[in-house]
Amino acid sequence: MSRAIVTLIQQSQQILDAMGPKVKAEANKKIAEIKQKIPTKGSVKQMMMDEISSKGPELVCSIEVRNRIDSIYDKLKSKSVKLQFILDQSNEKLKKLQEQLLKIGEIILIIEGIFVVLNALVPVLQTIITAAQVGLFLLKGPAADGDATIKFANSINKSNAKAEEIKNSIKVFKKKVDKITKKALIPMGIVTLALGVITIIKTTIITVISLIESFYLKYILMCDVEGDSMEDEDYADAINNAPDEADITLIEDDLLPGTIERIRNANFQVIRYRIA
C-alpha cells in the first residue's frame, strides 16, 4: 500500500513540475502579446479615414486611393485573422495543460481511496488485538505456557505495530497529498483565468474584424455603387455579397453618409465627393 501511494505521489509531482512552467509561459506571455497587437476601433477607423481624406474629396475613389484602401484592408484583416489563429492555438495548448493537471486530481482521488481502505484496517487490527488479549487472559494451566502464549503475544504486538504504522503512514502521506493539491490549485487557477481571458479577447478580435469589414464595405458602397438603398440593385447586391463579419447596421455611421458626401449632377450621377 505504502509503495503504491509513494508511486502515485511521485506521478502527481512529476506532472506538476512539468506543467507548471508551461502554464505560466502560455498564459502570461502569449495572451499578453496577442492582446497588445489587436487593432483598436479607433486605429482601424483612423487608418482608413486618414487615407481617404489625405488626397482630397475629388480623389476619394481614385485608383491610387482605392489600391491603398485595399492594402490597408488586407493588412488589418490578415493581422486580425492571424491573431485569432494564434489565440486558438494558445487556447488549445491551455486545454491540454488543463487535462494534464486534472490527472493530478484523479490520482489524489485514488490515494484518498487507499486512505479509506487503510483507515478501515485499523478497527480490524484493534479487534484482533482485543481478541488476542482476551484469549491470552483466558489461557489457564498447561495451555498458558509455551507456543500458545507466544502466538497470542506475537499477534498482539504485530497488530499494534501495524495499526500504528498505518496511522503514521496516513499522517505523512496526507501532508504530502495536501501539499501537492495546494500547489496544483495555482496552475489550475491560472489556466481557468487564461481560458476566460481568451474568450474575451476572441470576442474583441471578432468585433475588430467586423469593424474592418464594415468600414471597407462602406467605402465600396460609396465608390462603386450609384444608389444608397436596398431599392438599388447594385447596392442590394453589394450588401448581400458582403462578408458575414460586416456589420450592416454601421452603414449609416462614420464613413457613410455623415463623413463623405456624394455630389451629383442634374442627372443624379456622382461627379465628385465632399468630406463633410
Image (spheres, rainbow, N blue to C red):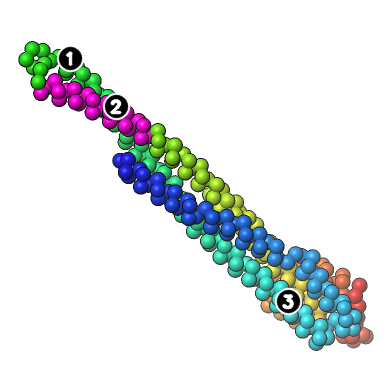
Q: Quadrant of residue 219?
A: bottom right
In the image, 93 versus 160, the foreground residue is 160
Q: Main secondary structure of the magenta part?
A: helix
**Magenta span covers which residues?**
147-170
Please, which residue is most extreme toward the right here?
A: 266
Q: Is residue 184 visible?
A: yes
The structure residue drawn at horizontal position 43% and vertical position 52%, both measured from the top left corner, is 14
Q: CA distance from mark 2 to mark 3?
A: 76 Å
* Residue labelled with disc 2: 123
Q: Position of residue 118 (x, y in %)?
A: 32, 34
The residue where tag 3 is placed is: 73
Residue located at (81% from left, 70% from top): 46
Residue 235 horizontal side relative to residue 183, left or right? right
Would residue 168 be counted in the magenta stretch?
yes
- Relative to residue 250, is residue 138 depicted above or below? above
The three-letter code of the residue at mark 2 reads: Pro
Q: Quadrant of residue 258?
A: bottom right
Q: Could you tell me the amino acid type at mark 1? A: Phe
Secondary element type, mark 3: helix
Determine the residue positioned at 19% across, 22% down: 153
- Work out whether 48 lies above or below 21: below
Between marks 1 and 2 in the image, the one whose residue lies nearer the viewer: 1
Inspect the image, locate mark 3, and give the three-letter code of the amino acid beneath it: Tyr
Task: Note whether 200 is above or below 39 in the view shown.
Answer: above
Rendering coords of residue 251 (x, y %): 78, 70
For image coordinates 48% across by 52% down, the residue present is 17
Instruction: Determine which residue is flagged by label 1.
Output: 137
